[in-house]
Image (spheres, grey):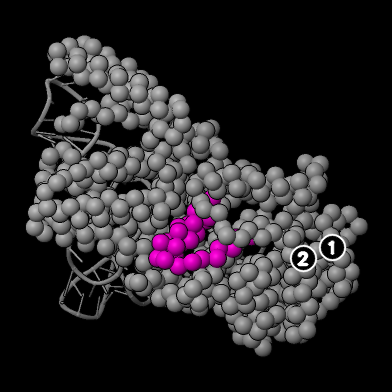
RNA sequence: GGUCGCGUGGCCGAGUGGCUAGGCAGAGCUCUGCAAAAGCUUGUACGGCGGUUCGAAUCCGUCCGCGACCUCCA
């Protein structure tokens, strides 16, 4: 197996990926807090890690992919206690049980992941299902002396941990001294000994909707803790890869490390991966409205699919959006715009069309190995090298497009198919399918078949194309063009080629 | 204010000391009954200013602009 290089946020450089246990890779990705609909930025992040998951599997690894659902403990605002829980806030607003809120948005999240053709993780644990594990972890942290109780709430003693372990701040590049000087955190009335300390168990108030019994009284676990507890439970106290959005690096992931380390004494994660943000109007896409304009710049996926957003001139399908995301590296910000999506749409269609052409290419002769053979094979090799280089999807995609050119040339007769060997053609076919479907996770939306209507449409189109063909043989251009133009109005494009006509539904 | 990152041709977006990224758009040509599709050709791009180097968009310094985190967000 060729080595895979992953950019590790912890060391800030690319490192060769060496699994702790080659038999089973542990991958943990921070999932959503299910208090509202996921927006497109969330989808980008999950899609990025879907590619990671897919590529690891392509490499032959068995992967345990854990992605959590946070359905408790995530507070609104920056207070550690006394603040409202996100779940509870939505529950009150919608007059629902917190678990109804969780279910509603979990289902919505799953639907969206399916639309983007993201694979399901192998385990999707929820915070409320792991209260016992979280309480146990709090106890471990207390036993190790890194926690303290104040009036029924438990805090993580960041200062003590930082002094003793020298790992705090490593991931986010923060120094505790600087944080000490930071005055902002003190603006809230707090029981904490130090602003950098954070709640791991929050005492329930009278009106707290979600609360559980614990050795310290009724309460709920703090945010950050669910990830520590559940990753430890399913992947062990040390595992391979942890992923999440760049915006989770601090405080979420930094505190996660502190909790794991404070409870188990080991650094939990070997490779930390962070995906960068999707931008809307040049700014991070966020659910929170802009304080100046009062409007959120987040685009909901549904708006994209239906085309009902001010930014968009038309609707874009999930696969076009996925293709659009693949064209950028996961560690770069990506600007969403109508123009960029239109370009992605054409590119996506071109790629899928070329795949169809490729699948239909056949040749019988087996000539000698030519330069063309080598060129194609090395381009295919390079595409995999690009993926091995920190999942460089845009680069790998560009290799595919290099071959799209050749594929179309073979079909159009600009290049002779017999200039490549049977084996090379076969490899090109399988590699294209592997990349497009297995690694990139794209679906073929250009195919009409798959249901009864599709089959009917295929038959109809065959008939119409035949009729037009006859008209053309008779040089009846009026009929021929009428068919072509009418179909065009119906968003069906007829493509005349050497071997007859094909058609495609325009987006 | 602190920490980090970015600024690439009309747009999106890779790359990173010397070799064509790619997609979209534009121009010319080929094919075609005409188109479309497809193919071919075509872009003196790397924020400004210095420096290192035989050579820098790529390294260093500096200035300007933008963003992320530091408070919930993938």
The residue lying at 58 percent from left, 77 percent from top is: A238
Whether A55 is among the magenta residues is: yes
Element under disc 1 = loop
Q: Quadrant of the N terminus of chain A?
A: bottom left
Which is nearer the eye, A187 or A137? A137
Q: Is residue A105 left or right of residue A280?
A: right
What is the x, y in percent for residue A303?
A: 54, 37
Between A279 and A413, the one lying in front of the other is: A413
Q: Nearer the viewer, residue A363 or A208?
A: A363
Q: Quadrant of residue A447?
A: top left
- Residue A393 location (% of width, % of height): 37, 57
Identify the residue position indicated by label 1 in the image: A212
In which image quadrant can residue A93 be found?
top right
Q: Which residue is mark 2?
A: A131
Q: Is residue A497 above or below residue A213?
A: above
Q: Is residue A322 magenta?
A: no
Per the model, the C-alpha gap separating discs 1 and 2 is 8 Å
Residue A434, image x, y percentages: 36, 54
Residue at 75 percent of width and 80 percent of height: A140
Residue name at image x 51 percent, y 70 percent: A25
Q: Earlier in the sequence, mark 1 or mark 2?
A: 2
* Other residues around mark 1 within 10 Å, as few (<14) / some (14–19) / many (≥20): some
User: Farthest residue toward the right?
Assistant: A206
Judged by its main secondary structure, the magenta piece is helix
Q: Is residue A422 visible?
A: yes
Tell me the SS state at disc 2: helix
Q: Which residues are magenta?
A: A43-68
Q: Contact, CB < 8 Å: mark 1 with mark 2?
A: yes
């Amino acid at each position: 197996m060729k080595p895979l290089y992953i950019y590790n946020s912890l060391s800030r450089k690319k490192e060769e990926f060496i699994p702790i246990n080659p038999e089973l890779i542990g991958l943990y990705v921070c999932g959503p807090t299910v208090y509202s609909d996921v927006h497109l930025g969330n989808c980008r992040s999950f899609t990025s890690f879907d590619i990671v998951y897919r590529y690891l599997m392509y490499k032959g690894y068995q992967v345990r992919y854990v992605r959590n659902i946070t359905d408790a403990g995530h507070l609104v605002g920056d207070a550690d206690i006394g603040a409202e829980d996100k779940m509870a806030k939505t529950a009150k607003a919608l007059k629902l049980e917190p678990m109804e809120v969780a279910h509603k948005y979990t289902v919505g999240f799953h639907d969206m992941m399916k639309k983007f053709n993201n694979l399901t993780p192998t385990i999707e644990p929820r915070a409320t299902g792991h209260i016992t594990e979280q309480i146990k972890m709090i106890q471990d942290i207390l036993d190790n002396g890194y926690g303290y109780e104040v009036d029924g709430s438990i805090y993580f003693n960041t200062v003590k941990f930082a002094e003793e372990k020298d790992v705090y701040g490593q991931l986010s590049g923060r120094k505790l001294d600087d944080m000490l000087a930071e005055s902002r955190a003190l603006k809230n009335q707090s029981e904490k000994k130090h602003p950098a300390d954070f709640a791991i168990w929050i005492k329930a108030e009278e009106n707290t909707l979600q609360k559980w019994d614990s050795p310290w009284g009724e309460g709920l676990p703090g945010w950050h803790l669910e990830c520590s507890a559940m990753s430890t439970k399913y992947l062990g106290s040390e595992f391979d890869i942890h992923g999440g959005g760049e915006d989770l690096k601090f405080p979420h992931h930094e505190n996660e490390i502190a909790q794991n380390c404070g409870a188990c004494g080991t650094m939990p994660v070997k490779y930390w991966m962070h995906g960068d943000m999707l931008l809307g109007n040049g700014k991070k896409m966020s659910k929170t409205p802009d304080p100046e304009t009062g409007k959120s710049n987040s685009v909901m996926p549904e708006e994209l699919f239906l085309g009902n957003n001010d930014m968009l001139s038309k609707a874009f399908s999930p696969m076009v959006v996925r293709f659009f995301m693949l064209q950028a590296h996961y560690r770069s910000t990506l600007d969403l715009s109508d123009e960029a999506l239109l370009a992605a749409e054409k590119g996506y269609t071109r790629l899928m069309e070329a795949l169809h052409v490729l699948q239909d290419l056949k040749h019988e002769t087996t000539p000698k190995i030519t330069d063309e053979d080598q060129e194609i094979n090395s381009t295919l090799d390079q595409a995999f090298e690009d993926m091995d280089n920190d999942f460089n999807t845009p680069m790998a995609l560009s290799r595919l497009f290099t071959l799209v050119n050749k594929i179309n040339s073979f079909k159009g007769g600009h290049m002779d198919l017999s200039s490549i060997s049977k084996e090379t053609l076969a490899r090109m076919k399988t590699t294209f399918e592997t990349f497009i479907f297995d690694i990139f996770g794209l679906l073929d939306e250009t195919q009409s078949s798959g249901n009864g209507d599709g089959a009917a449409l295929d038959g109809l189109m065959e008939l119409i194309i035949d009729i037009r063909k006859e008209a053309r043989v008779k040089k009846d251009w009026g009929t021929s063009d009428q068919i072509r133009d009418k179909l065009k109005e119906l968003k069906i494009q007829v493509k005349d080629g050497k071997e007859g006509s094909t058609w495609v539904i325009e987006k």
